Image (tube, rainbow, N blue to C red):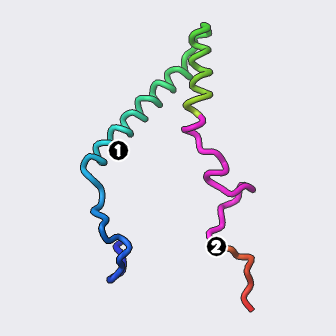
Amino acid sequence: MAAALGNTNANGNSGGKEWGKGNRKKAATLKGLVMDEAIRIMNSKSKSYKAMEEKKLVMNKILPNCIPRPIEVSGPDGKPIPLFDNTITKK
């Protein structure tokens, strides 16, 4: 959505840079590779010590960053985060 005519909030903002696009693409690729590897490790049926240690590492380090925590997507009570304070009454 474009800013209203005369809005100067974005003065001097030249927008996204070309190198930023490349970095976003690299980050998305890397995230995909990490997630594929995490899925492979978690789907492994091996019960060896090494496999179990890999699973622990994935569960402790990678999964907490991939799964949204309730407080991030809702308020502390699990309900939507209010955008406006509805407790103020007009007189």
The residue located at (65%, 62%) in the rendering is: 81
> On the picture, is 26 further left or further right than 90?
left
Instruction: Tell me the quarter of the image containing the C terminus.
Output: bottom right
Residue lying farthest top? 48
Which amino acid type is shown beneath numbered disc 2? Phe
Residue at image mark 1: 24
Q: Nearer the viewer, residue 84 or 10?
A: 10
Q: CA distance from mark 1 to mark 2?
A: 33 Å
Horizontal side of 72 relative to 29 (left or right) equals right
Q: Looking at the magenta stretch, what is its main secondary structure?
A: loop
**Quadrant where the image shows the N terminus:** bottom left
Q: Secondary structure at mark 1?
A: helix
Task: Please name the residue shown 39% across and 33% down the image.
Answer: 30
Tell me where residue 56 sits by quadrant: top right
Amino acid type assigned to the residue bearing label 1 in the image: Arg
Which is more toward the observer, 41 or 91? 91
Q: What segment is highlighted magenta in the picture?
A: 64-83
Report if residue 32 lies within the magenta region: no
In the image, residue 20 above or below residue 38: below
**Residue beneath disc 2:** 84
Place of residue 74 in the rendered image (x, y in percent of width and height, measured from the top left)? 65, 56
Kindly state the secondary structure of the residue where label 2 is placed.
loop
